[in-house]
Amino acid sequence: MIEKFDLLTLLHLDGIGCKTIINFYEEAKHRKLINLEFNDYIYILEEHFNKKYPKKEIEKSKLKAEKILESCYLNKIEIMSFLDKNYPKRFKNIKKDKPVLLYIKGNKKIMEKGFNLAVVGSRKSSDKGLKLAYNYSKKAADNGFNIISGLALGCDTAGHKGSLDSFESSENMGKTLAVLPSGINNIYPYENKNMALEIIDKEGCLLSEKSPNEQPNKYDFISRDRLQAALSEWLLIVESRIDGGTAYTAEYGIKYRKKLMCVGINIENKGMELNKKLIEKKEGVPIESLNDLMDLLTKERDEHNEISHQ
């Protein structure tokens, strides 16, 4: 059985990424080769790519893997693989898009239990948008819904803040989870470092695919968007342009058959183009008040609980 150390080593070899590992594992599983060891994977990958991984390169990757595991241990960061029994079902459900490794600090129950609402929007949101993101998140958290966002400036920050200001140490109160584009020891953006600490202090969670000390690359922001969508039952689009990063979260939400709601106030205004498009295409339900938000969330949660108890 391949271990976390082996997965880390593979991921640091040239040309091997998450999708490669997932695809090869699924193929091996299909062929009932489920007990493959690390060297078996190396052999198969060399055969597939028609290249040789020198022993020196493998040893270098193993050294990097050891340092990452040590950093996780020293900083109390849990590392979870897609092969672990407690790997979240919400990620299993996105199949080949699922992360190979997760780095987690804080309340990991948010990934598996509870009813999650992703609150997302522009980094350069209007004052009105920031106020709505805060108010909607606080109201949802007050009523036991967890808030998922990406710790970015703008709407993400306002969403996390709404949940944090709602905090009570109770299983019935909503908490917040931040999906990072960077490693947990290298909070991005730096301006939200204190908020990240507050999230942990208030029984929330920090989650990343990146090893603890890594900086974000351009594509990591899009990868982060898919995890936000996967973790949530509903996605709330507060305010976004068509070409904003929020559009990726919406696309993943639609791909994963999640339910989208969009702030429907002033959708003719500049900066609300994505909201308008999603509402007009009937891909997003318009939300114009706190009552609209809570009616939809409460109805969905009641139906979910009813099905779960059948």
Image (cartoon, rainbow, N blue to C red):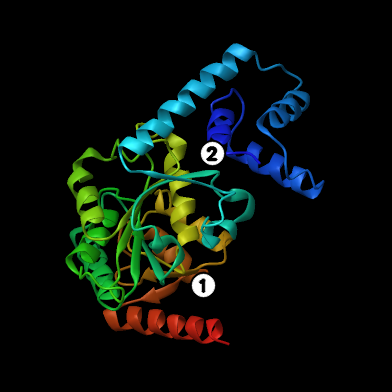
Q: Which mark is residue 208?
A: none
Q: Residue at x 28, y 74 (%)?
A: 173
- The percent coordinates of residue 216 (x first, y second) are 38, 35
- The percent coordinates of residue 258 (x first, y second) are 52, 67
Q: Secondary structure at mark 2?
A: helix
Q: Is residue 294 visible?
A: yes
- The answer to whether marks 1 and 2 mark residues whose Cβ atoms lie closer than 8 Å is no
- The percent coordinates of residue 245 (x first, y second) are 40, 48
Residue for badge 1: 282
Q: Is residue 310 left or right of residue 116?
A: right
- The percent coordinates of residue 193 (x first, y second) are 21, 43
Residue for badge 2: 4
Q: Is residue 91 left or right of residue 238?
A: right
Could you tell me the amino acid type at mark 1?
Lys
Q: Is residue 248 visible?
A: no
Q: Residue at x 31, y 73 (%)?
A: 171
Q: Is residue 261 left or right of residue 36?
A: left
Of the residues under marks 1 and 2, which one precedes in the sequence?
2
Q: Nearer the viewer, mark 1 or mark 2?
A: 2
Could you tell me the amino acid type at mark 2?
Lys
In the displayed structure, 25 sits above or below 67; it is below
Q: Quadrant of the C terminus?
A: bottom right
Judge by depth and name the residue closer to the eye, 41 or 144.
41
Mark 1, Cα crowd under 10 Å, few <14 / some 14-19 / many 20+, is few
Q: Quadrant of the N terminus?
A: top right
Q: Secondary structure at mark 1?
A: loop
Q: Is residue 171 left or right of residue 28?
A: left
Judge by depth and name the residue closer to the eye, 57 or 129.
57
Residue 157, by quadrant, is bottom left
